[in-house]
Image (spheres, grey):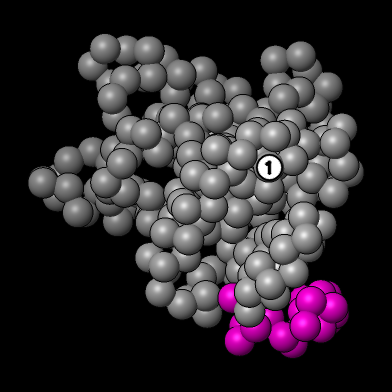
């Protein structure tokens, strides 16, 4: 994520606080993050999450996620036992953050991070899903995490439902489809979704139609593709799939 945007976000939050002279929230974590001192930032942020006075504050959990995400890109951390699963841990801490920030006090200030995290998580999840049964459990974990930190994003709910159906979890799959529809309705218009969310939704609709068709529900497959008709027909993959179900 662009560190200047992080800095601007935190400064903005500081000025929105109840006292303009107040210290920016967790600026010690900000400095470590911007300086790319990720291990130090993780250690300090985790200490805040374990302190009775600060464990309910959302930002330390968010910094844990952001630092681990950056570390997941760096070869030296990929080779370390403590951080070789940093990509998955970044998702876990993002979920923990969102549980602390239910009212989205800070969430929207970090939209660039969510877009980047979404892009990596959904690409990984789709790769697991498309690899077949052997990757389905990992795919489910990816999309479940995405719904945990960004429940307003409809695509992960639909992909989560598909992994649940593939795992013979019919009730859970139906519930995830219901939540997908609610998130899509709440968005109001697919065109208003961020690009990363539209990209996953496009793929999710194709996979959902394929799944319904495989179960003999051709009408359902056609209806699923209609959802994206006005938004994705310029995409060759979507148009090909749409034509095959009509």
Q: Residue at x 81, y 42 (%)?
A: 128
Q: Position of residue 241 (x, y in %)?
A: 81, 75
Residue 136 visible at all: yes
123 horizontally vs 150: left or right: right
106 horizontally vs 5: left or right: left
Q: Position of residue 153 (x, y in %)?
A: 50, 57
Q: Residue at x 69, y 72 (%)?
A: 219
Q: Which residues are magenta?
A: 227-246
Vertical order, 218 against 233 (above or below): above
Q: Secondary structure at mark 1?
A: helix
Would residue 230 be counted in the magenta stretch? Answer: yes
47 horizontally vs 145: left or right: left
Would residue 92 be counted in the magenta stretch? Answer: no
Query: What is the magenta segment's predominant secondary structure?
Result: helix
Q: Residue at x 10, y 46 (%)?
A: 18
Q: Looking at the rendering, in which quadrant would you find the C terminus?
A: bottom right
Q: Position of residue 220 (x, y in %)?
A: 66, 67
Q: Residue at x 55, y 30 (%)?
A: 92
Q: Position of residue 130 (x, y in %)?
A: 85, 49
Disc 1 crowd, CA 10 A, few/some/many (<14, 14-19, 20+): some
- Mark 1 — residue? 165
Q: Nearer the viewer, residue 184 or 119?
A: 184
């Amino acid at each position: 994520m662009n560190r200047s945007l992080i800095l601007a976000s935190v400064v903005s939050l500081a000025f929105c606080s109840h006292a303009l002279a107040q210290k920016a929230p967790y600026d010690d974590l900000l400095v470590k993050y911007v300086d790319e001192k990720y291990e130090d930032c993780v250690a300090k942020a985790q200490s805040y999450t374990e302190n009775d006075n600060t464990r309910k504050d959302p930002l330390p959990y968010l910094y844990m996620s952001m630092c681990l995400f950056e570390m997941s890109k760096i070869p030296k951390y990929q080779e370390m036992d403590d951080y070789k699963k940093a990509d998955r841990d970044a998702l876990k801490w993002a979920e923990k953050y969102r549980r602390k920030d239910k009212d989205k006090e800070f969430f929207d200030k970090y939209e660039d991070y969510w877009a980047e995290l979404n892009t990596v998580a959904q690409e990984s999840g789709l790769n697991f899903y498309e690899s077949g049964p052997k990757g389905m459990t990992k795919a489910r974990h990816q999309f479940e995490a995405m719904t945990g930190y960004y429940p307003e994003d409809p695509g992960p709910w639909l992909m989560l439902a598909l992994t649940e159906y593939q795992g013979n979890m019919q009730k859970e799959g139906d519930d995830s489809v219901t939540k997908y529809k609610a998130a899509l309705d709440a968005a109001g218009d697919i065109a208003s979704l961020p690009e990363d969310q539209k990209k996953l939704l496009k793929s999710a609709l194709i996979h959902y139609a394929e799944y319904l068709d495989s179960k003999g529900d051709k009408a359902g497959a056609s209806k699923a593709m209609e959802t994206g008709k006005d938004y994705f027909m310029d995409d060759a993959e979507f148009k090909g799939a749409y034509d095959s179900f009509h």
